[in-house]
Image (cartoon, rainbow, N blue to C red):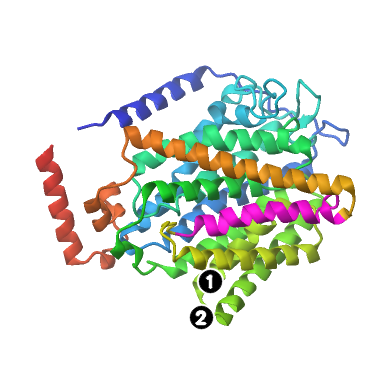
Amino acid sequence: MIKKRWIILMAAMVIFAIWGAFAHEGSFDCEFGTEEGQINPADVAWLITATIFVLMMTPGLSFFYGGMVGARNVISTMLQSFIAMGIISILWVVIGFSLCFGDDVGGLGIIGNPFTFPMLDNVGGATYITENTGKFVGGATIPLALFALFQMKFAIITPSLITGSFAERVRFSGYMWFMIFFFFFIYCPLAHMTWHPDGLFLNWGVVDFAGGIVVHASSGVAALAGAMFLGKRKTDNRNAEPANIPFVLLGAAMLWLGWFGFNAGSGLHSDGLAVKAFLNTNTSSAVAMMTWIFFDCLRGRKPSAMGAAVGCVVGLVAITPSAGYVTVGQSITISFIITLICNIAVNWGKNRSIDDALDVFPTHGTGGIFGTVLTGIFIQEGLIAGTQEGFIIFLYHLLAIVIVIVYSFVVSYIGYWLVDHFIPMRVSAKSEKIGLDISQHDEHYGLAHVAEREIAEYAEYEHEKHSKN
């Protein structure tokens, strides 16, 4: 029996395809030159490269998360990240870019006009200046279409980060509907407030160079809400060994490489700022990896591949909001402090009743939150300046992160509740026991990982399902 939710999604694809046949396309003719508003070929080449790097982070996250879960849930966990490249890309083209970077609605700095760039109308090879304040959206030297592509990759990976919190127990169709909800009601407003020239946070003086607020704090807090809403996994799943630690290392390596585009590309120019962000990104990740391993050893643990992988990613998260604005020495300090905080948060969280399966909030959420706080301290205009204006800028960073925490938690919890009201977000106990790979997708991770008992359980599950139908 075909369920209504799939009919609705397929109908939406039909409408999207028909609309696409008649949508207007902006000109891709580029006016090259050195004047403001003219396209710089070097910047274009670098941003294309950076965009590719950022897109690679989502498959990297698939391996990173997929290797951590039990062998019965590898494919489902990886697909939850991978599917975002399809869903968010479509939403971004239809209306997402407008909501994030369209002309500000009402002068409030909270959301963009959905009719500025519907179906990427008039998004092409030229630059774009806002109607309200006459400021460039997406820089003055790259095509607006390239900026839209670059920012799309940020929108793709953000909901993917959430999936680690409720791994091994979420219904795939319910997760897809929540991803759509998160994108419209959390990601788009925060991206507009933080990165649009007329955005509320930006005009407060809040600095988020590449996504400490928009990407990591928002997804980390939404992940915490998801872990609380869906409840704990069954005991046998919580104690399962990681399916493939080499996958985790591969994913961490892909994230590290992709993060150079994530951070160094966020300056939107091929210049010294990009080099500075590149240097700070690599240094912070290296410091965090070694700090994590050394701190584990001080606590009586052995140095581990999992620790090294998680540590390097924490360093990447930590430096994201300040990558282009702090010195390399300050990047070491920021990374060291946040790594210790995240390590303590991860180990503290393991003894709590909240089952954040892959420690999304203790790493991404905590890293994004404290990264933003330390950004308010260490940027040149911040608390470290020792002036009244610097103290005010620091307070605005604190206010912004408090708003993000409260808003992301409350709205995402509402989103889980709404989706669950129509599609149960948690799978049945039987489905969870046999694993989501088989129960949700009729696939499994390698025949060697499917014991005869598991095959028998699946056969029993299929028989019960068909009997009910």
Q: Which residue is mark 2?
A: 301
Q: Residue placed at 69% from the left, 20% from the top?
A: 106
Mark 2 residue crowding within 10 angstroms, few (<14) / some (14–19) / many (20+): few
Q: Is residue 358 visible?
A: yes
Q: Which residue is nearer to you in this view: 66 or 447? A: 66
Expressed as whole percent of the image width and height from the top left, the position of residue 447 reads: 26, 64
- Kind of residue at badge 1: Gly
- Kind of residue at badge 2: Arg
Above-or-below relation of 443 to 37: below
**Magenta segment includes 255:** no
Q: Report helix, strand or loop for mark 2.
A: loop
Q: Which residue is nearer to you in this view: 47 or 441? A: 441
Asked if labels 1 and 2 touch by Cβ distance under 8 angstroms, the answer is yes
Q: Residue furthest left?
A: 467
Magenta: predominant secondary structure element?
Answer: helix
Expressed as whole percent of the image width and height from the top left, the position of residue 235 reads: 30, 63
Determine the image quadrant of residue 99. Answer: top right
Q: Which residue is nearer to you in this view: 434 or 340? A: 340
Q: Residue placed at 63% from the left, 68% from the top?
A: 340
Quadrant that contains the C terminus = top left
**Image position of 416 (left or right of 103):** left
**Image position of 69 (left or right of 23):** left
Rounded to the nearest whole Å, what is the CA distance between mark 2 and mark 1?
Answer: 10 Å
Expressed as whole percent of the image width and height from the top left, the position of residue 379 reads: 81, 53
Q: Magenta segment, which residues?
A: 358-384
Q: Report helix, strand or loop for mark 1.
A: helix
**Image position of 1 (left or right of 75):** left
Quadrant that contains the N terminus = top left
Q: Nearer the viewer, mark 2 or mark 1?
A: 2
- In the rendered structure, which disc, 2 or 1, sits on the residue that comes first in sequence? 2
**Magenta segment includes 380:** yes
Q: Which residue is mark 1?
A: 307
